[in-house]
Amino acid sequence: VSVVSPLRREDRRAGAHPRPSFAAVVAAHQDAVYRYLVHLVRNHHLAEDLASATFERALRDWHRYDPRKGTPAVWLVQVARLTALDHFRSEDRRRGREARYAASEPREVSDAPLPSESSPALREALGRLSRAERELITLRVVLEMDTREVAQTLGITPSAVTTQLHRAMTKLRREVTRDDA
Amino acid sequence: MMREAVSPERLAALVDGREAPRSAEERALLALAVDLRGLEGPAPESLRARLDALVAESESEAPARQGRGRLASIWADGTRRRTIFAAPIGALAAAALAAALLIPSGGTTPTGPAEGFKATREPAADAQTPQRSLAPAFSATPAPPQGSAAPTPSTPSAVMAAPVTADQARPQDVRTWTRVHVEDVQALSRASARAMTTVHGLGGFLASTHYSVPDAGQGENALVFKVPPARVEAALRGFSSLGTVIGQRAATVDLGRRLNAGARTLRRQLERVRQLRAELARTPSDAGLAARLAAAEAAYLATSDRQNAVRDRTQMATMNLTLTTVGPKSERGQFVGALYRAGGRLAGGAAWVMQALILVLPPLLIIGAALAAWHARRRRTRRRLLEAS
């Protein structure tokens, strides 16, 4: 099983972390950012919009990126995370406003399950995890970041990453098994 | 069915590909990870097109962005960042403005002690008599320009602030000591002549003078004048116009009781002389009586001389004037004086910093507390948002 994507290997080979061009960073990491957002928000269209907003924000803040502090992937995921959190926050406020004026109105489902193209059981099980658990699994397993990078991205300790990943994966496995049963 | 537990570290090693699965549970977890990686495909073409347009736009704007300075970049980052950047600067500027308006200028500047009169150490005639130092009234009085006959208007008022006027109704011994700094030896000579002219004009006279010029640049003239007590003030005014007064002292001794006691002694001795003369007239051959009369007459004459001397002291005030080309010296040594000045400046600076901190610290603390509260609230919100499924 190949567990390290070519993009991640390229990042790690950079070694001294020379500052890449923004175009190169976009080309190298747009898939990773998109997959991270899809897993987090569970909506392809929304993930696409958020990915676009993420790269616009990254372009605006590109002068603040310091290669010595982390790889472009970590920095981009941090930007994507802030973008997603801003979206969640605004959605939360919007729902609150709507709930006050129209309690019976059905919820807008940005977190609705993805269309079951493949592995519907796995998608269902993922949907029952919290956003934080999905985020951790996405960063550590799907995007194949190492423990230190995930810790840097989420602002927690590496041991907390290891523990929380174990908890999330165990929960996911339990949910998948339950669906199978 | 009982599952075999997989430790967190073991799971991390499996996910990283550092170790191979050994149990069925580990194989299942690894298969789950592979399924997760294959769950979502790459970014859709529509996103790629949008990002290509963004990159093309960024490359066309790149020169403009590169030419922008750091501050300009921060300023261009949006309203929130502008506010975060500008708020502390605005608070500091406001505090500095308030400090400039509220802190009185020179309020904390340390001042050295007034230069006292130390050159003349002649003791007062009577240890029990009160003495007055006029140094504060004359501290560093500036000399009038050359050719100006009259003293500056401020000088007489300074003299009047501490008048040395003998009480005409009481016999008093008035003595003054004045030290005046002049520019050079030529000025010393001119000031000596002017002092004598002034004193003569006031009805006094020069009792003694000691003029010394040990080298070409420095010199001193110690003059002693006798001046009518009623003219002492006028004489002091004249002395202060000779140069810069660097020290002055005055002493007034009340001689009334001493004169009264002398008069009583004189009367007693005179009575004794008269009595002895009468006895000697009755017995002219008494040699012992003649000798006692001679001693009594001598004692009377001596007492009379002393009484006259005391009375003479009440007739004329003694005014000591020292004209010198040597400026006032600090009481401290050069090194200690420099240390004192440096310490004063340091204390002044520290006081300024403390006052500035008193003004600046509260707004900074409020801003810091507000930022900390904002960050804590943000963390709580993020946690809540991420806990949702």
Image (cartoon, coloured by chain):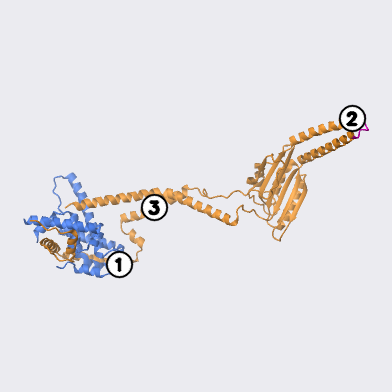
Chain colours: A blue, B orange
Spatial distance from mark 1 to mark 3, Cα to Cα? 31 Å
Give the left or right position of residue A126, taking residue B346 as reference: left
Label 1 amino acid?
Ala
Residue A147: mark? none
The secondary element bearing badge 2 is classed as helix
Label 2 amino acid?
Glu
Mark 1: few, some, or many residues within 10 Å (few <14, many ≥20)? few
Give yes or no for residue B285 being in the magenta stretch.
Answer: yes
* Residue pointed to by mark 2: B279
User: Number of marks in the image?
Assistant: 3
Q: Chain of mark 1?
A: B
Q: Chain of mark 2?
A: B
The secondary element bearing badge 3 is classed as helix
Residue visible at 64% across and 51% down in the picture = B142
> Are the residues under marks 3 and 2 on the same chain?
yes
Badges 1 and 3: C-beta atoms under 8 Å apart? no
Residue B90: mark? 3
Give the left or right position of residue A25, taking residue B327 as reference: left
* Residue pointed to by mark 1: B62
Label 3 amino acid?
Gly
Spatial distance from mark 2 to mark 1, Cα to Cα? 136 Å
Spatial distance from mark 3 to mark 2, Cα to Cα? 109 Å
